[in-house]
Image (tube, rainbow, N blue to C red):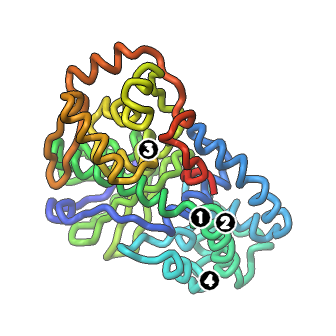
Amino acid sequence: MGWWQLNADTLARSRFVLSPFAETFAALKLLHIGVAAHPGEQVWLRDQLPRYRRLLADDPVTGLLMRAGIGRSWIADFLSPTPRDREPFEAAVARVRTTPPATARANLTVSLAGPLPAALERDDLPERAARLLEYVWEETVRPSWERRRRVLEADVVARTAQVSQGGWAAVVDALRPGRTRWLGENRLQVNLHEYPPREISGAELVFVPVTANGANGGWVSWEEPDRYAIVYPCVGALADRRGRPVPAALGALLGTARAGVLVLLSSPMSTSQLTAMTGQGLGSVGRHLKVLLDAGLVERRRAGRSVLYSRTAAGEVVVEAAGPGTAWGRGEVWAARENDIYRS
């Protein structure tokens, strides 16, 4: 396994960062692998994969570059520069484009774990990679970026609350189950590869969520010796905003939108999470929560700087008594279906 050695101050200073470039590269990985983790990704792949494959069929050199760069056990470093806080997509892709050609070829030999194919012995590989990333951003991610961003923000709220409740060890254990793990003695497992440990004490450590869950569970990257990142898939319930059941009787009693909020609160959530998951406006979610609070069906408590809502015992009884559900998307909660993060 691969692990990083870090002191307590480095972990305490670590933070979550949202990155449109990381979201785009995760989408590229998902297109490359072509295997969905949940129905939302299946819909997205159904819409996007044919065009992506036609694009690479018309440009076999770039297709070969992607097959070489997204290896089975390692990603060519120049394809996934380490995310920086508040960095626009255009600035990040410029780092890909300006990679020295010799560096790009050297990175590819590592991801291939073998010699570079003759067709890739050329100097335009960074430019080709940048153009493909720009296509994925413009055509598949940017149209839904605001929706994706809200989902990612909701995940960060949940993780931050988890830090206050269970400490950083609980957070890192849950980021990429089976891959990231707090080992004790200031050691952080970051993947399953047999690479030498890295001492990162004093460096910047960031955690970066992405919505793609079917892209092999994220990745790690770094810019030695100053910056290290763990990119991880956000909470599955947030990434897949489809198929949540609302009991028909409960929808008739409370209204579909308000009933949907109550159903989601089987586990504690913030207003940001509820906004991301339901597609409703922040004001609408707030009004639903006030009604549910006044009725004694939900309760709230503070977790660090966040306020989390959950069902009370009475709320549990009401949901259970309402019986089997009907699918989200048949009521007002999902009326703005075209805004779903997996449709562009």
Decide: few, some or many residues near mark 2? Use Cα within 10 Å; few <14, some 14-19, many ≥20: some
Amino acid type at image mark 3: Thr
For label 4, the SS is helix
Q: Which residue is mark 4?
A: 102
Q: Earlier in the sequence, mark 3 or mark 2?
A: 2
Q: Position of residue 342 (x, y in %)?
A: 59, 50
Q: Nearer the viewer, mark 3 or mark 4?
A: 3
Residue 33: where, in percent of width, then height? 66, 50
Identity of the residue drawn at 52% across and 42% down: 334
Q: Earlier in the sequence, mark 4 or mark 2?
A: 4
Q: Which residue is mark 3?
A: 278
**Is 92 drawn above or below residue 250 in the view shown?**
below
Sequence order check, earlier mark of 3 and 1: 1
Q: Which residue is mark 1?
A: 143
Q: Separation of disc 3 and disc 1 at Cα?
A: 19 Å
Mark 3 or mark 2, which is nearer to you?
A: 3
Amino acid found under the numbered disc labelled 4: Ala
Q: Amino acid at mark 2?
A: Glu
Disc 1 is placed on an element classified as helix
